[in-house]
């Protein structure tokens, strides 16, 4: 009997020890884990979209187990909100929102799209009904009943889907969005029809139902440090993302991507048509730099695609100026340039397949189509108009490197007129030809001349010599 009592006492102590171990946080408090902290400290606008995109990609590259949104926002645009929610959905780890003070409107939407929500003391969340901002951000405008109903229904459906996914109370979320919804909990009306629900931290953590569940928040936590300790991540390595001032520039840089490409192509075209290296080349390089800079600060791609673009451009230049006639070199370079321009606008995430899908390519393809059509039109107009205007001689005189003047250029062209040489590359119809020791840019009048054929200079088009087959 005594042995049985002793055995029961020992088993009881063992069970108590196991219960205590299960209730206590792990001893290492997340040592070896990675936590990414993403501050949401401004209105939900395109610059914040770029910060979230960059943050999620950085968290994925770091192998983060947890992504924490440190939130204090008054809300913002619905389109930016939905874009942020879609980006967060790509993160493979756990997501938590910490409402540091306020999560109004769009902030409440984003919080509902994370797995868990915690709140700081005296913080609030809610008031998420859609509004319409006047042109130029001039203030709130009234929406018609039909428009308000459509927008509210669409937003409510999207946010409700995420709330259901993560087990949030959908009735609470809908009462924050739709003025036509009433929220009654345990016989108490928390939000009457015609009102928009906003909850304090104490109200949001109130447990209701059977079994009891919090209305929205899992609890009030005094600091972000205390939250990480509660989540078992006090000793985890932390990666805190900070906003860049340049991310505000990305809004207009990205919206004008097509224009930067047109400027880049046009600048390089003029540079190739004028001797030396000067302002057109600088403008062209600046256009391409703005194109890739916009992609970088928007979080779409790193500088690797800009490097690939420069490599392709170098291969094309070697084909034209150093080893003319090596078709493979120029073709590969042109392909690298094209791939770099496309991929710079593709939103790729770590771990995704290296070949993008069509939805990812749709926007870059449209941008490049507009840019290439615009570039073709600009080149055509410049080739017809620029050499015939007073601007062209001045451009050549002032912008070339060295002291070569228009008169010297014209004199040099006269020495080439009538001379015969050999085509160094296939002329289709432009290319390179050698006259004595000199290699010259040439163009035919439409004929296709094979490499190695004899040609004769019969005139000039800009800086290119016009040639014909020589018998």
Image (cartoon, rainbow, N blue to C red):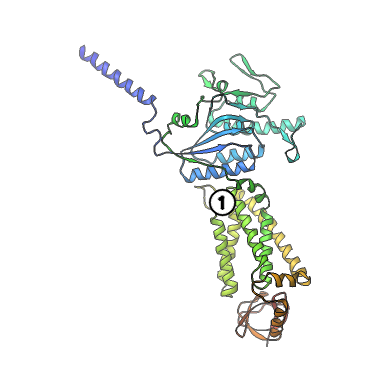
- Identify which residue, 398 or 78, lies in the foreground: 398
At horizontal 59% and vertical 74% (from top left) the residue drawn is 321
- Identify which residue, 342 or 277, lies in the foreground: 277
Q: Secondary structure at mark 1?
A: loop
* Image x and y of residue 46, in percent: 64, 42
At horizontal 53% and vertical 27% (from top left) the residue drawn is 120
- Name the image quarter holding residue 203: top right
Res. 120 in view: yes
Q: Quadrant of the C terminus?
A: bottom right
- Identify which residue, 409 or 326, lies in the foreground: 409
Res. 466 in view: no
Determine the residue located farthest toward the top in the rendered image.
1
* Image x and y of residue 7, in percent: 24, 17
**Residue designated by label 1:** 301
Q: Quadrant of the N terminus?
A: top left
* Image x and y of residue 196, in percent: 67, 24
Determine the residue located farthest toward the bottom in the rendered image.
471
Image height check: is 441 above or below 343? below
Determine the residue located farthest toward the front in the rendered image.
403
Total numbered labels placed on residues in the image? 1
């Amino acid at each position: 009997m005594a042995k049985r009592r002793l055995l029961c006492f020992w088993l009881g102590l063992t069970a108590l020890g196991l219960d205590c171990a299960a209730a206590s946080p792990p001893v290492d408090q997340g040592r070896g884990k990675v936590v990414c902290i993403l501050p949401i400290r401004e209105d939900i606008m395109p610059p914040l979209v770029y910060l979230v995109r960059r943050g999620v990609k950085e968290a994925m590259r770091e192998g983060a187990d947890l992504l924490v949104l440190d939130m204090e926002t008054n809300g913002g645009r619905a389109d930016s909100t939905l874009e942020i929610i879609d980006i967060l959905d790509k993160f493979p780890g756990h997501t938590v929102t910490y409402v540091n003070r306020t999560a109004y409107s769009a902030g409440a939407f984003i919080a509902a799209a994370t797995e868990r929500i915690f709140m700081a003391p005296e913080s609030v969340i809610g008031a998420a009904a859609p509004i319409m901002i006047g042109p130029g951000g001039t203030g709130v405008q009234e929406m018609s009943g039909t428009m308000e109903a459509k927008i509210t229904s669409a937003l409510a459906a999207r946010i409700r889907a995420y709330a259901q996914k993560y087990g949030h109370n959908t009735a609470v979320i809908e009462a924050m969005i739709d003025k036509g919804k009433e929220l009654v909990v345990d016989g108490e009306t928390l939000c009457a029809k015609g009102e928009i629900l906003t909850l304090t931290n104490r109200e949001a953590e109130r447990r209701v139902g059977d079994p009891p569940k919090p209305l929205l928040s899992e609890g009030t936590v005094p600091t972000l440090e205390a939250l990480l300790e509660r989540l078992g991540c006090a000793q985890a390595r932390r990666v805190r993302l900070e906003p860049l001032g340049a991310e505000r520039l990305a809004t207009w840089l990205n919206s004008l991507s097509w224009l930067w490409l047109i400027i880049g192509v046009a600048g390089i075209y003029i540079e190739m048509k004028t001797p030396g290296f000067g302002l057109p080349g600088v403008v062209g390089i600046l256009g391409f730099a703005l194109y890739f800079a916009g992609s970088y600060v928007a979080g779409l791609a790193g500088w690797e695609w800009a490097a690939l673009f420069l490599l392709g451009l170098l291969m094309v230049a070697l084909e034209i100026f150093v080893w003319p006639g090596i078709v493979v070199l120029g073709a590969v370079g042109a392909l690298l340039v094209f791939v770099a321009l496309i991929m710079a606008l593709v939103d790729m995430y770590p771990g995704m397949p290296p070949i993008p899908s069509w939805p990812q390519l749709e926007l870059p393809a449209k941008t490049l189509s507009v840019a290439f059509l615009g570039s073709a039109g600009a080149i055509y107009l410049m080739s017809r108009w620029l050499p015939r205007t007073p601007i062209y001689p001045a451009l050549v005189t002032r912008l070339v490197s060295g002291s070569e003047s228009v008169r010297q250029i014209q004199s040099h062209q006269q020495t080439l007129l009538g001379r015969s040489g050999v085509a160094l590359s296939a002329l289709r119809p432009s290319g390179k030809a050698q006259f004595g020791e000199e290699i010259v840019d040439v163009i035919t009048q439409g004929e296709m001349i094979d490499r190695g054929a004899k040609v004769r200079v019969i005139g000039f088009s800009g800086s290119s010599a016009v040639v014909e087959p020589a018998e």
